[in-house]
Image (tube, coloured by chain):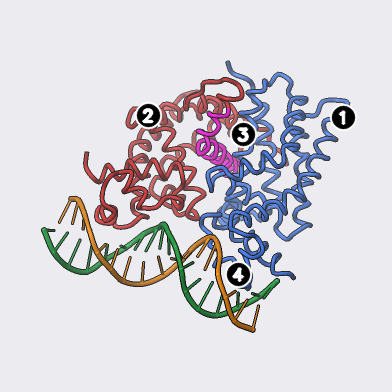
Chain colours: A red, B blue, C green, D orange
Amino acid sequence: MSTKNKILDAAEHLFADKGFNGTSLREITSLADVNLAAVNYHFGSKKELIKAVMSRYMNELSPRLEASLTVICQQETPPSLVEVFSAFVEPLLSLNVFKENGTSNFLQLLGRGYTDSQGFLRWFLTTQYPGVIEKFVVAVQRAYPELSAEDIFWRLHLTMGTVVFTMSSSDALMDIAQSDFGQQIDISDVINKVIPFVAAGVGAPLVH
Amino acid sequence: MSTKNKILDAAEHLFADKGFNGTSLREITSLADVNLAAVNYHFGSKKELIKAVMSRYMNELSPRLEASLTVICQQETPPSLVEVFSAFVEPLLSLNVFKENGTSNFLQLLGRGYTDSQGFLRWFLTTQYPGVIEKFVVAVQRAYPELSAEDIFWRLHLTMGTVVFTMSSSDALMDIAQSDFGQQIDISDVINKVIPFVAAGVGAPLVH
DNA sequence: GTCTATAACTAGATAGAC
DNA sequence: GTCTATCTAGTTATAGAC
């Protein structure tokens, strides 16, 4: 296993757990069992390392997601909102095949990216991977044509918030569910709890 | 204005904007225009300062919130979920009277507390202010008796995620809404977009 | 209570030997 | 490509004069 990949794996794990600001290069290189200077040799800076960690997932996920949403959009009958959101499940769970705990790690990282580092990752994702967002908006419009562009904007951000925040604390939530209710939960169970919630939220009646 | 309050105000502003980890005592004391050593003199440590910033809001908010939820619970007819969530509006907006931008600042801080610093603030809030959570659960149970304790647990966390995440990026969202749609939005507009979303989410049909 | 000065430590980044 | 050693700048926290 190459030094570069050892760093990426260690960084991913620590970033998801403690955030980007909360993780030092020394912790990363120590966990990866490589020299401190290797990060700057292979990636140039911590910021570039963060981008590299996210890109590894996005390059795997975004084509699958676009394909899945395209199928939904090309159906003859308009989809339900639950169908639209369910289009995310298979691509997201495929990250678990690509990498152990991939789904959970990626969603946690996404959450970190939105709150740490004052939105530089939000900028990175929306400018580097605009296709996914566009296709998603089209799918929602087909499912709920009465929603205006403004309403879609707001409700998609609320959805993003629900998903990303839940996933970034999913480890803690799974622990609590286990200890308080004896529920043995995994990441796909969490996804199946989130989908009806956000589908109902996006489909909520409009108030004026 | 006392040194202590100058520190609290500056810390609140910077913590909301850049997170707890991302804000140094030097930035705080410099914005507050007090000496660096004053933080440790008045609060003992950065961690205690964080608690003090949150407590100032929670001590104002939690009695209002408990009172508001108690009214909802004591109504003869069970409330709707929208009514339950609307019980939060007046107490939250009262923070704007208590302090300029209080509502927005508090909700942003709450978001930070859940993602920064590995849940120490979550622990602090749930152990120090359990009354609000209990009353909230009772109100939701009256509104939607078919929901099991587990379902309420999950959906309340999803709600928390939606609210807290949205609010922690509310400045950015308001800016985008302004530039893309010409919408002039303030924090109470955002709250009025969130309520139907989370009420519908919590009230979503159960899948088994 | 407020200040200066500084201790004790950690951060990201790099020069240069191998 | 990998290492050690080190630089510069930042961090929290504190001792002690005023």
Quickly name the residue at label 3. B157
Per the picture, the main secondary structure of the magenta-coloured stretch is helix
Residue behind mark 4: B31
State whether discs 2 and 1 lie on one chain: no
Q: Distance between the Cα atoms at labels 2 and 1? A: 48 Å
Dot placed on the residue nearer the N-terminal end, 1 or 3: 1
Q: Tell me, yes or no, whether dots 4 and 3 are on the same chain.
A: yes
Task: Give the quadrant of the N terminus of chain A.
Answer: top left
Query: What type is the residue that disc 3 sits on?
Result: His
The amino acid beneath tag 4 is: Leu
Q: Do labels 2 and 3 share a chain?
A: no
State the SS at label 2: helix
Residue B17 shown left or right of residue A50 in the figure = right
Q: Numbered disc 3: what chain?
A: B
Q: Name the residue under label 2.
A: A96
Compared to residue B78, the image places residue A15 above or below, namely below
Q: Give the range drawn in magenta.
A: A148-176
Q: Circle 1 sits on which residue?
A: B75
Q: What element carries label 1?
A: loop
Residue drawn 48% across and 46% down?
A112
Give the CA separation, mark 2 to mark 4.
46 Å
Pointers 2 and 3 in contact (C-beta within 8 Å): no
Mark 4 or mark 3: whose residue is earlier in sequence: 4
| Residue B110 visible, this angle | yes
Other residues around mark 2 within 10 Å, as few (<14) / some (14–19) / many (≥20): some
- Callout 2: residue from which chain? A
